[in-house]
């Protein structure tokens, strides 16, 4: 929170009523601490007066897994936003609510920013892991656990063919935006 900055004697008192908010998602094999430990996000939060919320993604791509009731997307797109707005002085405006992420978090930012477009006014996606197109071809032979079919099915569901035409695909979501919100999905 920008308000966490100590007030030094002689400084003007900060009286901002609510803060714009950035929900910042980490990448695979990372944690919610990555942004604090490896970037200057705290300084940027103070400098620009933006609250930053960094939830854990637990290597689950920030999507809903209905079979196990692990609703990461719903948590990011609705519950977390509602909760943080109740607990902290955050702006309720869509235009002041942003979501961004790196790699898996970039995918999560795109997916949840588009799915919950009534919540988020801006989306930032850095080196997004847009892995949807090859999910159904995955086998369990990769030495990298996150590239196996077993992992893909655990995260995206057992019908990997259906993922490309579902709300787990940011391009599919972008193509369904209303005309006034339409973006060119070729940039995804």
Image (cartoon, helix red, strand yellow):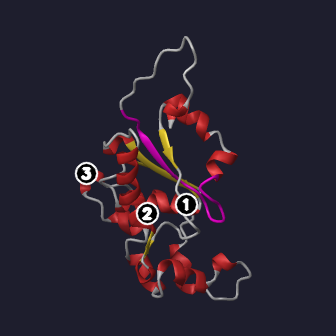
Give the side of residue 51 with respect to residue 81, left or right: right
Q: Secondary structure at mark 2?
A: helix
Residue at (59% x, 86% y) in the render: 150
Q: Which residue is mark 2?
A: 111
The residue closer to the viewer here, 118 or 4, is 4
Q: CA distance from mark 2 to mark 1?
A: 16 Å
Q: Which residue is mark 3?
A: 180
Give the magenta-colored segment's residue range.
18-33
Q: Position of residue 137 (x, y in %)?
A: 57, 86
Residue, far right: 143
The residue closer to the viewer here, 105 or 87, is 87
User: For residue 19, what is the image quadrant?
Assistant: top left
Contact (CB < 8 A) between labels 2 and 1? no
Q: Earlier in the sequence, mark 2 or mark 3?
A: 2
Give the side of residue 153 with respect to residue 90, left or right: right
Residue at (48% x, 84% y) in the render: 160
């Amino acid at each position: 929170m920008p308000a966490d900055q100590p007030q030094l004697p002689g400084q003007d008192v900060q009286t901002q009523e609510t803060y714009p908010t950035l929900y910042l998602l980490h990448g695979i094999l990372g944690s919610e601490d990555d942004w604090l430990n490896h970037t200057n996000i705290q300084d940027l939060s103070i400098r620009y007066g933006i609250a930053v919320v960094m939830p854990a993604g637990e290597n689950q791509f920030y999507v809903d897994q209905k079979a196990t009731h692990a609703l990461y997307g719903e948590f990011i797109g609705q519950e977390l936003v509602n909760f943080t707005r109740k607990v902290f002085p955050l702006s309720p405006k869509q235009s002041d609510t942003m979501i961004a992420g790196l790699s898996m978090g970039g995918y999560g930012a795109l997916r949840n920013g588009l799915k919950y477009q009534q919540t988020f006014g801006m989306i930032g996606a850095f080196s997004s892991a847009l892995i949807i197109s090859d999910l159904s071809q995955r086998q369990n032979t990769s030495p990298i656990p996150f590239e196996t079919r077993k992992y893909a099915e655990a995260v995206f569901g057992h019908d990997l063919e259906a993922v490309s035409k579902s709300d787990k695909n940011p391009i599919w979501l972008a193509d369904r935006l209303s005309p006034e919100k339409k973006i060119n999905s070729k940039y995804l």
